[in-house]
Amino acid sequence: HFKGNNYELLDECMDGNGDKCIFYKALYERDIKFFVRPYDMFFSKVDKEKYPDVRQEWRFEKIDDINVK
């Protein structure tokens, strides 16, 4: 994630309106936390006006395998 935390994309799903979403979990929390975000938002670019100092282009970017404890 462009703010520095790591997440694991688990699956695609649909919300109650039939809109495509992404189901993912936080890898930085001791307790497992799951999230759902609209597909287009998950795969959107970082808002450079709101976050001008962020160098990452996309909100979420794939990284190489990491060790998660």
Image: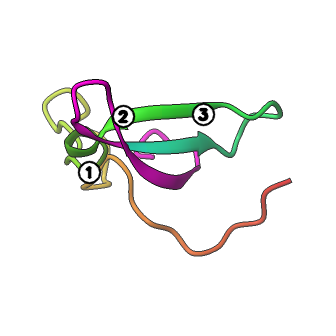
How far, Cα to Cα, is label 1 from label 3? 17 Å
Residue at far left of view: 49
Specify the label residue 34 is tagged with.
3
**Colour option used:** rainbow
* Left or right of residue 53: residue 34: right
58 w.r.t. 64: above or below: above
Residue 41: image x %, image y %? 24, 39
CA distance separating discs 1 and 2: 10 Å
Side of 5 where 55 appears, left or right: left
For disc 1, the marked residue is: 43
Which of disc 2 and disc 1 is earlier in sequence? 2
Q: Residue at x 20, y 44 (%)?
A: 40
Residue 35 is situated, as x and y percent measured from the top left of the image, at: 51, 32
Badge 3 element = strand
Label 2: which secondary element: strand
**Mark 3 belongs to which amino acid?**
Phe
Distance from the alpha carbon under mark 3 to that under mark 2: 10 Å
Residue 6 position, x and y percent, is 58, 49
Residue stretch rendered in magenta on the structure = 1-21
Residue sitting at x 30%, y 53%: 55
> Does the magenta run of residues contain 9?
yes
